Amino acid sequence: QVQLVESGGGSVQAGGSLRLSCAASGFFTSRFCMGWFRQAPGKEREGVSYITGPSPSTYYADSVKGRFTISRDNAKNTLYLQMNNLQPEDTAMYYCAVVRAPFSAGSWSTDDYTYWGQGTQVTVSS
């Protein structure tokens, strides 16, 4: 049974940093594309970053490029999102997600991700 549990959210001032974690169970993170998405109140869920399976490649939304870093510890079966220089517009609920099929290419579409965590709130004040 696939489970994703996010943690690490919180409240910070603009310019601060947070590291989100997503503990995965029921599958091997090394084989699957996993992504971070976020959803602000009244807005659609949007892709922030994703990392592909073996020989991983990483991808970032333009809005976070240069500030956020996605990584994965396969030994711990955990996905991370290091967020630096946070801005008020980064305020949202952050979700991790995984695609259904192993070794598949990544995607920005929420439709391509089958399993989702419960989310962790990130609030950035100015």
Image: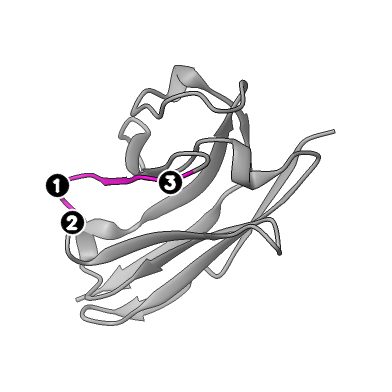
Check contact, mark 2 vs mark 1: CB within 8 A: yes
Whole-number angstrom distance, CA of label 3 to CA of label 1:
19 Å
Q: Which residue is mark 3?
A: 56
Magenta range = 55-63
Q: Could you say where residue 15 lies in the image, as x and y percent from the top left?
A: 21, 81
Q: Quadrant of residue 45?
A: top left
Query: Which residue is drawn at the image coordinates 61% and 21% (left, top)?
Result: 101
The image shows residue 66, relative to residue 113, as above or below, that is below
Residue for badge 1: 62
Q: How crowded is the residue under tag 3: few (<14 C-alpha within 10 Å), some, or many (20+)?
A: some
Task: Identify the mark at residue 38; answer none if there is no mark.
Answer: none
In this rendering, is residue 11 above or below 121? below
Question: What's the amino acid at mark 1?
Answer: Asp
Quadrant in the picture for residue 41:
top left
Quick one: label 2, few (<14), some, or many (20+) residues within 10 Å?
few
Image: 47 above or below 23:
above
Query: Given the current orientation, which residue lies at the most extreme front position?
Result: 55
Closest to the observer: 27 or 126?
Answer: 27
What's under tag 2, amino acid-wise?
Answer: Lys
The residue identified by callout 2 is 65
